[in-house]
Structure formats: C-alpha cells, structure tokens
Image: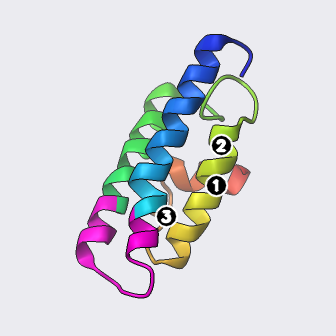
Amino acid sequence: GKSAADDAIIDGWLSFIWNSIDLPLQVAAGSSTEAVETDVSKALETVEKYLASSKRTYMVGDSLSLADISLAVSLNSATLAAAKPSDGSVLGEWLAIM
C-alpha cells in the first residue's frame, strides 16, 4: 500500500480471505458440504457489501494491491468449487476487472 494504514488494511483482508474463503475450501477439498458453501457464500457477501458501499475499483486504495490479487485467486478457487459471486453483483464485476 501507499501508507502504513493501507498496509494494515491489506493485511486484514489477507487474513479474512485466508480464514473465510481459502481455509474452508481446503478443508472441504474432495467433499461438497453445505456448511462450507454457506460459510464461503457469507464471506463473498461481506466482500460484495464492502465493494458496493465503498464504490471502489480496488480493495485498498486506488491501485491494485496484494489484497486484490489474493481475492481474485481465491474467488477463482471458490468458483471452481461452485461458490461463485452472483451474476450482476458488484463482486462479479470486480472479478471481471481483475
């Protein structure tokens, strides 16, 4: 990030992405459980609300950051696991930009 505050926000998003998307998907690897899909869907809703409320193109600041890259990779994994952003959602639009 461009500042220490941006770096802290990026770190927060990296932690959120790991704990709320990546880890549940890894735990559920090889099995399809509704609980994991629900947890990941809730995480995607959180990101959707953040992007919609902040009207940002990027997760932190006005340029691409590690938080954007990490989220894009995680969303690709979630999509492959059938927990993808809704069509027409802000999160879906964000992913298309990435």
Q: Are marks 3 and 1 in contact (CB under 8 Å)?
A: no
Left/right placement of residue 47 relative to residue 2 reads left
Left/right placement of residue 76 relative to residue 63 reads left
Disc ID at residue 68: 2
Residue 7, placed above or below residue 24 = above
- Estimate the x, y position of residue 6 in percent, counting from the top left: 62, 19
Question: Closer to the N terminus: mark 3 or mark 2?
Answer: 2
Q: Secondary structure at mark 2?
A: helix
Q: Most prominent secondary structure in the magenta stretch?
A: helix
Q: Tag 3: residue type?
A: Asp
- Estimate the x, y position of residue 57 in percent, counting from the top left: 65, 35
Q: Which residues are magenta?
A: 24-39
Q: Are marks 1 and 2 in contact (CB under 8 Å)?
A: yes
Q: Which residue is mark 3?
A: 87
Q: Tag 2: residue type?
A: Asp
Q: Nearer the viewer, mark 3 or mark 1?
A: 1
Residue farthest to the left, as pictured:
35
Q: Which residue is mark 1?
A: 72
Residue shown at the point (50%, 58%) measured from the top left:
88
What is the C-alpha distance between the residues marked 1 and 2? 6 Å
- Estimate the x, y position of residue 76 in percent, counting from the top left: 61, 66
Residue shown at the point (30%, 60%) measured from the top left:
39
Question: Closer to the N terminus: mark 3 or mark 1?
Answer: 1
Q: Tag 1: residue type?
A: Ala
What is the C-alpha distance between the residues marked 3 and 2? 19 Å
Residues 59 and 91: in front is 59
Q: Are marks 3 and 2 in contact (CB under 8 Å)?
A: no
Residue shown at the point (48%, 41%) measured from the top left:
15
Residue 23, placed above or below residue 58 = below
Residues 63 and 93: in front is 63
What is the C-alpha distance between the residues marked 3 and 1? 16 Å
